[in-house]
Image (spheres, rainbow, N blue to C red):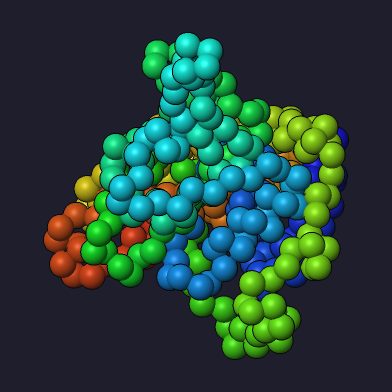
Amino acid sequence: MTPDNVQQFLAHLSERVGRVVLGSEWNTRYAFVSFLVRGHLLLEGVPGVGKTLLARAFARSLGLGMRRVQCTPDLMPGDVIGANVFDFRTQSFALTRGPVFTEFLLVDEINRTPPKTQSALLEAMQEKSVTIDGTSHPLPSRFMVMATQNPVEHEGTYPLPEAQLDRFLFKLEVGYPDEQQELGAVLAHAGSGGTPDLDALGVNALATPEQIDALREVPSRVRLEPSVARYCVMLARATREHPSLAVGLSPRASTMLAAAARANAACDGRDFAIPDDVKVLFLPAARHRVMVTPAAEMEDVRVDEILRQILTQIPAPR
């Protein structure tokens, strides 16, 4: 596989997902970049803007086995990762696998469940394995988490800890569609009660598992010049020094940003990364990893405004 193959596949993927969620081109691209570099995705938006539909259409188009966890305050870690259950017939313990044992895990309203259950995903997202009663169990090689959260309702929610937020490659803010996109969605899906039928829309796997695995190997062959890598580092260090930010990007974040830049280059059919790859990914890769100071928060300074300011202040290499 070559970057041209990646570019062509993304075009087909965007068209297929766009049948279900209109105006989703950039979100589909970010999701695909995350998948290519084995990252995870956090979607934030009010109910009804297509977050779950985007996840379903994306997983179906990639041919990934998908399972869904609907988070609630009483959800326990064992409900996510599974547990060893005693079988009276065999007089022994047998592993009951939880929904995390899948290729694509949709965690709906992740901030509705307590930190103890949220942390059950940490090992899965970082190590691609889970530990149950002292035994480590590997997850599928194509394992990916896409989580959603509602930014409006705060009653009965548990904000994600910084350590877990850092495991997500991107945080995407899914807003309302424009008038034409919303009208198109109403005309296209009003006959199905507002819930599109993916089969009727022809949303199916675009490639075999072997072809998908080959696509994921392409970014590792994309050239990353030291100047572009240094640009990632300088942006990360600028977030640590900005007076309006209490916490900046970690070295892991700058490393993941550089890896995502290589995947984004492949999505454009290039075998080399450029500063523009970093620029277009910086906001979704950084907005959930930084913390605004109390003083800036009182002045209603938004995180994205600070990050855009940093982009203008740090000169890109030529």
Looking at the picture, tell me which residue is in the foreground, 221 or 8: 8
Q: Residue at x 42, y 38 (%)?
A: 79
Q: How many numbered callouts?
A: 0
Q: Is residue 312 left or right of residue 247?
A: right
Residue 55, quarter of picture: bottom right
Residue 298, quarter of picture: bottom left
Looking at the picture, tell me which residue is in the foreground, 183 or 39: 183
> Residue 221: where, in percent of width, then height?
74, 30
Q: Is residue 72 above or below residue 308?
A: above
> Residue 171: where, in percent of width, then height?
46, 53
Q: Is residue 148 left or right of residue 299?
A: right
Looking at the picture, tell me which residue is in the foreground, 79 or 280: 79
Q: Residue at x 47, y 63 (%)?
A: 173
Q: Is residue 281 above or below residue 140?
A: below
Q: Residue at x 68, y 54 (%)?
A: 58
User: Which quadrant is the N terminus positioned in?
Assistant: top right
Q: Is residue 185 left or right of residue 139?
A: right
Looking at the picture, tell me which residue is in the foreground, 117 or 178: 117
> Residue 212: where, in percent of width, then height?
78, 38
Q: Residue at x 44, y 23 (%)?
A: 85
Q: Is residue 66 visible?
A: yes
Residue 199, quarter of picture: bottom right
> Residue 139: where, in percent of width, then height?
58, 27
Q: Is residue 68 left or right of residue 266?
A: left
Q: Is residue 27 visible?
A: no
